[in-house]
Image (cartoon, rainbow, N blue to C red):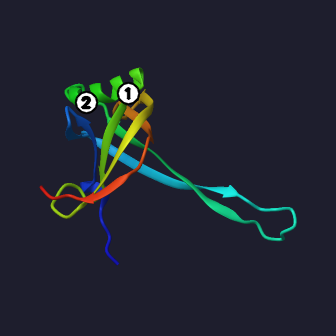
Amino acid sequence: MGKIAAKNSLIMIEVSDTPTALMACKDWALNTSRGTIDVSTIDSEWKEFLTGQVSADGSATVIYDPTDTAVQTAIETAMWEGTIVTMHLRPEGTGSGKPDYELDALITGWNITGATEDAISIAISFTGTGKITKTSQTTV
């Protein structure tokens, strides 16, 4: 069974139409789920369902870097103004043939924290709007 270390994975935000990595990313998650529609009737012993809609959300934690202004500004602007950002999640990093999950998303949370003996971190949460597109990268 093949295993892949997360250390090479990337989460990116498009800045001026260019996918740009969230620098100093500690962790990220992309969650998807499909809803169901209950069509059970009172005269049936077993429940029945129709396929519902798919939704996506996720999160990332980054170490605060005051020099990473392009990505930080894009995320903050999207949060404060309610604008949509295009995100790319690359579980195997960047490279030809490696997967790229692209989605438009609303930034729904931006939380900055600091603690004794820890770096300042920013926790970002997002909700997808529309379909996730999975492609294979063609360039490095």
Element marked by disc 2: loop
In-front residue for pair 116/131: 131
Q: Quadrant of residue 48?
A: bottom right
Quadrant of the rendering where the N terminus is positioned: bottom left
- When the figure is inspected, residue 140 is found, relative to residue 97, above or below; the finding is above
Residue 122 in the image: x percent, y percent? 38, 32
- Which labelled disc corresponds to residue 65? 2
In-front residue for pair 15/125: 15
- Image-based side of 32 in relation to 6, left or right: right
- Image-based side of 129 in relation to 2, left or right: right
Quadrant of the rendering where the C terminus is positioned: bottom left
Q: Residue at x 25, y 32 (%)?
A: 71
| Separation of marks 1 and 2 at Cα, in angstroms | 23 Å
- When the figure is inspected, residue 64 is found, relative to residue 19, above or below; the finding is above
Q: Quadrant of residue 37?
A: bottom right
- Which labelled disc corresponds to residue 83? 1
Element marked by disc 1: loop
Residue 83 in the image: x percent, y percent? 38, 27
